[in-house]
Image (tube, helix red, strand yellow):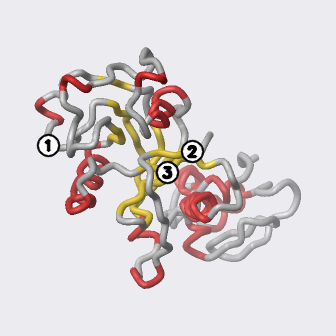
Amino acid sequence: MAYWRMQLHPNDSAAALRHTASCLAAGFIGLDFGSGTGPTAPGDDVGDLLRAEPASLPQGQGAFRAFATDMNTGDIVLVVAHNFPFALCRVASDYNYVRDIPHELGRAIWFRHFRRVDDVRYYGDLVTNPRDWQACVMVNTIAPLRAEDTGSYALIQEWLSKATASRDCPCCVAGVSFERPRVCPTCGHVFGGNGWDGIDAHWRAKHESLMPYEEFWQSLCMRHRGVEAR
């Protein structure tokens, strides 16, 4: 799994948030070529990036090819708008190219080169006070994040770690540590042995009236579950 940064607006700063939000709401990220707003003029279309010669791409936009050749399903993309983080999403498809954007997508996307995404999270939901937003200056359209000491890389790591703490997880709600020993979020009983040893018998004896054991176990986030119940 690799990390990336991208901007999704077509050289149209005045409508950057509108373009970015509509693309993500439709479940896509993408890009196109040229200096104008919107898709490249038909005569300047570079075609499928998996077949295009790198030397044939417009000057200053050769790095766009990585969107097709280097990005993979499962990669994480930090979407930036107006030099602030806007969203985090996961790549959910291979690269796609269409010469003509389908009419049903025309209101949502403006690019011919795209990938589907899922698990979209918005920065404003992570950091709710705009005064605390972390600037993320970006002058290019797409860039891989390889250096772990950068602010963007650290932000993604922090965001993903917080996302594992599900609001529906009883242990997260109760503030139970991710570290062992495992603790019952309802009564505080501390489990010995290998993690959650005995949780099934304990829950059925003490808390089955609150929630069936199977439902409780499935409601735990992956970090609190740790190992399968025995």
Image location of residue 61, percent across then percent down: 42, 37
Depth check: give the residue in front, 223 or 72: 72
Q: Amino acid at mark 1?
A: Arg
Seen in the picture, residue 214 relative to 96 is either above or below; the reply is below
Outermost residue on the left side: it is: 103
The residues tagged by marks 2 and 1 sit, at their Cα atoms, a distance apart of: 28 Å
Q: Quadrant of the N terminus?
A: top right
Q: Which mark is residue 5?
A: 3
| Drawn side of residue 192 relative to residue 206, left or right | right
Question: Of label 2 and label 1, which has the lower sequence position?
Answer: 1
| Drawn side of residue 73 relative to residue 24, left or right | right
Q: Residue at x 23, y 41 (%)?
A: 109
- Secondary structure under tag 2 reads strand
Outermost residue on the right side: it is: 193
Image location of residue 62, percent across then percent down: 46, 33
Numbered disc in front, either 1 or 3: 3
The residues tagged by marks 1 and 3 sit, at their Cα atoms, a distance apart of: 24 Å
Numbered disc in front, either 2 or 1: 2
Image location of residue 221, percent across then percent down: 59, 56
Image location of residue 123, percent across then percent down: 42, 66
Q: Which mark is residue 179?
A: none
Q: Amino acid at mark 3?
A: Arg
Question: Of label 1 and label 3, which has the lower sequence position?
Answer: 3
Residue matched to label 2? 144
Question: Of label 3 and label 2, which has the lower sequence position?
Answer: 3
Seen in the picture, residue 1 relative to 173 is either above or below; the reply is above
The residues tagged by marks 3 and 2 sit, at their Cα atoms, a distance apart of: 6 Å
> Would residue 208 be visible to someone looking at this image?
no
Q: Residues within 10 Å of mark 3 (few under 14, many from 20)?
A: many
Examine the image and state in which quarter residue 200 appears.
bottom right
Residue matched to label 1? 107
Q: Residue at x 71, y 71 (%)?
A: 177
